[in-house]
Amino acid sequence: MNVTQTDQQINTRLAHDHLLGLEGYSSEEIELVLSTARRFREVLYRPIRKVPTLRGITVVNLFFEASTRTRISFELAEKRLSADTVNFSTSGSSVLKGETLKDTVQNIEAMKIDMVVVRHRSPGAAHFLTQCVSSTIINAGDGAHEHPTQALLDLLTISDRFGYVEGLNVTIIGDIMHSRVARSNIHGLTTLGANITLCGPPSLLPVEVESLTDRDNVHVTSNLDEALEGCDVAMALRIQLERQGSNRLPSLREYHEQFGIKMSNMNQHKDLVIMHPGPVNRGVELASEVVDHERAVILDQVTNGVAVRMAILFLLSGHADVDQT
Ligand code: NCD
């Protein structure tokens, strides 16, 4: 497929102007992102990994919180699409001199930009920016609220592995309470018709999970064996120690014993596929051999992350309607 065909075939638009979360995104919108990502993923395997699709578009990456994968993935996605990119991180910025988020972003926008990718420790930060500036906002993680591009890349990985998502049994294990990845995946997976089991220590299952149990396709348990029974995909989450006000775990060693996926689980469940958003703490949420197991698709998730971010940048850029020929 060449670039011209890629751009001509992608002619449907998202109903949203921003990507703040997967809550409210329809299955058609999610499927559009996934099919667009599959087309862009092909660019990553070319000798010259670049298309002119977003030439002339300026994207600012605002990272107020630590990030390796997500920041590099967005930056690569922007460069693969030929956008102009500017990177901002808190260290060395005027935020350290007391400037507010609103002032920082309004000043950056005054330099004439088109899109902002934002990661911030406060839930709602991405939504707040839509009220302050007219640029397109993409949420790269806002506190414990949502991390929509992570869930989209997870959905792409699952969908490509099985050929479908509807009816699959997906178990999300770990610190559900502090995880924006869990929250976005719950929205995305239920929208596409998967059955979800949330598994973790009672102290790390949020109170509102109770209301989710009213949904037919969301099940909650603190028993790992029960959570892995009949499970197609196990998504392990890092314990978000930086977000836990008080210590909610006896010890990481005990956590691993009760909730870590071990080789014995892999041997018992012969078709189980393992996912993890990273960064992995080997020997805590996954035994080290499980991280490297042939049924762990953690690095496929990372590759799919670039493709999904290319798709989102393209679909929200306004260029999806423009004939690129
Ligand atoms: C996640 C995050 O930052 O929310 N990582 C990621 O973006 N790949 C999960 C985590 O930090 O544990």
Image (cartoon, rainbow, N blue to C red):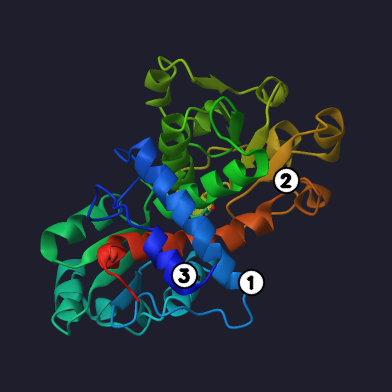
Badge number at residue 117: none
In which image quadrant can residue 91 be found? bottom left
Q: On the image, numbered disc 2 is attached to which residue? A: 286
Q: On the image, numbered disc 1 is attached to which residue? A: 45
Q: Given this view, does label 2 or label 1 mark the residue nearer the observer?
A: 1
241 left or right of 146 in image: right
In this view of the protein, which residue sits in the foreground, 105 or 48? 48
Secondary structure of residue under mark 3: helix
In which image quadrant can residue 105 be found? bottom left
Residue 59 image position (x, y, % from top left):
31, 75
Examine the rendered structure and indicate whether residue 28 appears above or below residue 71. Answer: above
In which image quadrant can residue 106 be found? bottom left
**Three-letter code for the amino acid on which mark 1 is drawn:** Tyr
211 left or right of 257 in image: left
Q: On the image, numbered disc 3 is attached to which residue? A: 71
Does the image show residue 280? no
Residue 108 image position (x, y, % from top left):
20, 79
Q: Residue at x 19, y 56 (%)?
A: 128
Examine the rendered structure and indicate whether residue 275 appears above or below residue 259. Answer: below
Residue 12 image position (x, y, % from top left):
32, 52
**Pointer 1 local density, CA inside 10 Å: few below 14, some 14–19, many at least 20:** few
**Three-letter code for the amino acid on which mark 3 is drawn:** Arg
Q: Residue at x 68, y 34 (%)?
A: 259
Secondary structure of residue under mark 2: loop
Does the image show residue 311? yes
